[in-house]
């Protein structure tokens, strides 16, 4: 138990620090905080205190997924400091203590029916009184977002069955359930967001890119037999025609392939014995570095050193745990700009 971080600050203090850091993050040159180091430690403690409940939810997800099909990819991550601050920037009314996805895990399965079966295991159990008390869910497969994103999100609240673990009671964890195609779509959106430096993933960015992904969302819906994205052609011929034109206009294939080629895969030899992997993406140089750590605390300290550079830094870091290096690339392909599966489907979707 000693290895897991416990919350050291009140939720009121966590919210005050979040509010104090927001102006600094939004306008770092014009605004300073009295003690950025101390404020960062508060946020870091709150964030890393989700690691223990996240691990619990991840194990529960893995156990359920094994009942559905073999080869399910399961991964977990704590929300990056930059992502956390950007979310507060997008939603200034949100309090840091109320953020429900500081810890998240996901399962990637073969089909919509597999997603539904996995989701049924959460709804069927109710999980009330267990360590994975279910809080709420959003079904973006039946009701896809306007940008084309789909998947099912389950938010659970940790509830200890043993008094020794009560310190983590109430921590919220988000679980994402996706098909391979839905995951490929989300990966492509994150890749374009990263390399174009636009908030495409969050409903912003250029209108032509937003339209392209809405069309792709409907193309995936046709393939999977689910709801089309509102505002896209209902006639398949019209959809294919517009999607083809949009892909050509944006040079989607050329751009995504170029970004993929720009990334370098780290040698697996250097990751032997690592339990925690630090992914450092240098957007300006189009390179990725993966550093393996056996000690979670040292890994967290390395992340902190990068994050303290603030929003103007060119490095983007995330600390992840997955079962193997192969699963790392499959679960976090956006860090490698690996959009191969997305491009393969784009070709299929635009071929009459």
Image (cartoon, rainbow, N blue to C red):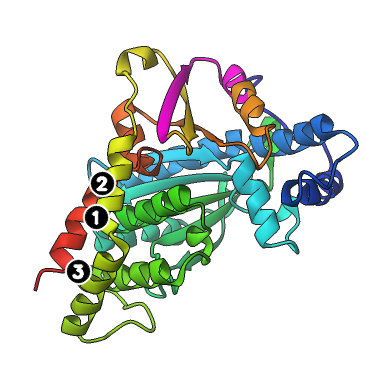
Label 1 vs label 3: CA separation? Answer: 20 Å
Determine contact: label 1, label 2, CB under 8 Å: yes
Q: Which residue is mark 2?
A: 257
Which one is in front in this view, the residue at disc 2 or the one at disc 3?
2
- Looking at the figure, which quarter contains the N terminus? top right
Q: Is residue 254 visible?
A: yes
Residue 302 appears at what percent x and percent y? 60, 22
Secondary structure at badge 1 equals: helix
Question: Which mark is on residue 253?
Answer: 1
Q: Which mark is residue 223?
A: 3
Which image quadrant for residue 120? bottom left
Q: Residue at x 22, y 54 (%)?
A: 343
Q: Locate residue 3: give its quadrant.
A: top right
Q: Earlier in the sequence, mark 2 or mark 3?
A: 3
Foreground of the two, 216 or 253: 253
Q: Is residue 291 above or below residue 283?
A: above
């Amino acid at each position: 138990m000693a290895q897991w971080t416990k919350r050291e600050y009140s939720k009121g203090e966590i919210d005050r620090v979040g509010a104090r850091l927001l102006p600094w993050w939004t306008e770092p040159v014009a605004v300073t905080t009295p003690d950025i180091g101390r404020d960062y430690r508060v946020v870091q403690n709150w964030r890393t205190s989700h690691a223990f409940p996240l691990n619990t939810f991840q194990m529960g997800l893995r156990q359920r997924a094994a009942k559905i099909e073999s080869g399910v990819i399961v991964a977990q991550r704590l929300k990056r400091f930059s992502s956390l601050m950007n979310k507060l920037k997008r939603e200034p009314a949100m309090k840091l203590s109320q953020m429900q996805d500081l810890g998240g895990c996901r399962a990637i399965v073969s089909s919509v029916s597999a997603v539904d079966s996995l989701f049924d295991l959460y709804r069927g159990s109710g999980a009330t009184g267990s360590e994975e008390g279910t809080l709420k869910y959003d079904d973006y497969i039946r009701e896809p977002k306007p940008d084309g994103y789909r998947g099912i999100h389950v938010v659970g609240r940790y509830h200890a069955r043993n008094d020794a673990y009560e310190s983590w009671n109430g921590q919220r964890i988000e679980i994402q359930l996706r098909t391979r195609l839905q995951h490929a779509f989300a990966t492509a959106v994150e890749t374009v967001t990263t390399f174009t430096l636009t908030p495409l993933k969050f409903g912003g960015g250029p209108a032509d890119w937003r339209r392209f992904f809405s069309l792709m969302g409907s193309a995936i819906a046709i393939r999977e037999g689910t709801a089309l994205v509102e505002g896209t052609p209902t006639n398949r011929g019209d959809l294919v025609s517009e999607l083809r034109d949009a892909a050509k206009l944006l040079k989607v294939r050329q751009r995504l392939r170029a970004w993929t080629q720009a990334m370098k895969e780290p040698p697996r030899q250097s990751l032997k014995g690592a339990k925690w992997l630090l992914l450092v993406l240098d957007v300006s140089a189009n390179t990725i570095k993966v550093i393996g750590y056996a000690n979670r605390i040292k890994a967290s300290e390395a992340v902190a050193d990068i994050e303290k550079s603030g929003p103007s830094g060119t490095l983007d870091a995330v600390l992840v745990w997955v079962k193997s290096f192969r699963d790392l690339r499959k679960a976090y392909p956006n860090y490698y700009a690996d959009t191969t599966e997305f491009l393969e489907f784009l070709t299929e979707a635009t071929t009459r």
